[in-house]
Image (cartoon, rainbow, N blue to C red):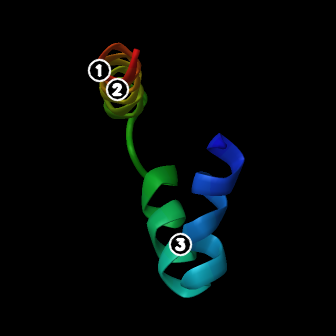
Amino acid sequence: MVLVIEGLLPFLSPGSWRRGFSQLLQLRDGQLRFFGLCSIVFGLLLLWLIG
């Protein structure tokens, strides 16, 4: 399911996905870790709400 969701943006709008990905490459390590932590917390909340 994760691969399906992650594949939607590059399939529907490859130009926007490429621009967004290139901006991600310019972020500092701390910023990437923060986004990763937010993703983990959001995913755990979704699992908790669904389960």
Which image quadrant for residue 44?
Answer: top left
Measuring from the top left, give residue 37's x and y in whole percent: 35, 20
Whole-angstrom CA distance, mark 3 to mark 1, is 29 Å
Q: Are marks 2 and 1 in contact (CB under 8 Å)?
A: yes
Q: Residue at x 67, y 55 (%)?
A: 4
Where is mark 1, residue-wise? 49
Q: Is residue 13 above or below residue 27?
A: below
Whole-angstrom CA distance, mark 3 to mark 2, is 24 Å
Q: Residue at x 70, y 48 (%)?
A: 3
Circle 3 SS class: helix
Circle 2 SS class: helix
Q: Nearer the viewer, mark 2 or mark 1?
A: 1
On the picture, is 19 further left or further right than 34?
A: right
Circle 1 SS class: helix
Measuring from the top left, give residue 51's x and y in whole percent: 40, 14
Mark 1: amino acid: Leu
Q: Residue at x 45, y 67 (%)?
A: 20
Whole-angstrom CA distance, mark 2 to mark 1, is 5 Å
Where is mark 2, residue-wise? 46
Measuring from the top left, give residue 26's x and y in whole percent: 44, 53
Mark number displayed over residue 17: 3
